[in-house]
Amino acid sequence: MTTVTASGTKVKVTEAPPQEWVLQAAQVRALRTMPEYARNVSDVLAGRGRFTLAGDQNSAKRGPKARMEAVAAGMTSGEHDVRIYMAGGVLGLIENKVGKAGLEQSQKDRHPLLAALGFSRQAVIRAVTEDDAARQAVEQVRAWLAEAS
């Protein structure tokens, strides 16, 4: 939307894109509603659960002390945002980007390293809405589950 100020200056106002964590949260909510999602070991033993997940927030803003503690405890730059643990010991990795944002250098280094170690199920999901991010994550996990069958 374009507005004109009292001095006659035109100002274009656009809605800010969502933060990456908001897209990730939408994905996690959607993935947890899938019938294949394992909430506990009983789901797996009964043949209902085929995957579970874990998410990270490596890009979260931290003060110097909190950052030092996180790095000392194993936080690694470039790590994917969401890990999908599938039956049979299969791991899927999802990296989220808002719109056309590129990978950071740490991700350009880390992702190929993981692929070289055999973790080939990696996806970069680019979205600008929560619904799109969630849809893409569900589609990706369904594809990985189909491959693992």
Image (spheres, grey):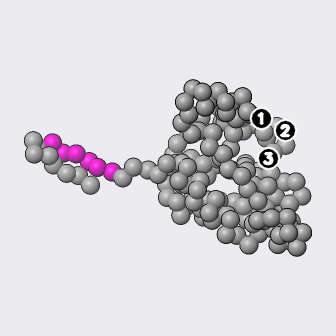
Q: Quadrant of residue 132?
A: bottom right
Tell me the kind of residue under disc 3: Ser
The crowd level at tag 1 (other Cα within 10 Å; few <14, some 14-19, many 20+) is: few
Picture layout, residue 79 above or below residue 124: above
Tell me what residue is drawn at x 62 percent, y 63 percent: 29
Residues drawn in magenta: 9-14
Q: Is residue 29 above or below residue 112?
A: below
User: At 18% from the left edge and 45% from the top edge, which residue is drawn?
Assistant: 10
Query: Which mark is on residue 113?
Result: 1
Q: Nearer the viewer, residue 1 or 65?
A: 65
The picture places residue 141, in percent across and down from the top left corner, at: 72, 61
Alpha-carbon span between mark 1 and mark 2: 6 Å
> Which amino acid type corresponds to the residue marked 1 in the rendered image?
Leu
Residue 145, x across and y down, in percent: 79, 63
Q: Residue at x 67, y 63 (%)?
A: 31
Residue 104 on the magenta span? no
Q: Secondary structure at mark 1?
A: helix
Q: Does the residue at mark 1 contact the one at mark 3 (Cβ under 8 Å)?
A: no
Tell which circle, 1 or 3, labels the residue nearer the N-terminal end. 1
**Disc 2, SS:** loop
Query: How far across and how far down the image is residue 131, in percent?
Result: 53, 64
Q: Secondary structure at mark 3?
A: loop
The residue carrying mark 2 is 117
Find disc 3 in the rendering and name its residue: 120
Q: Amino acid at mark 2?
A: Leu
Q: Is residue 108 above or below residue 10?
A: above
Q: Residues within 10 Å of mark 2 (few under 14, many from 20)?
A: few
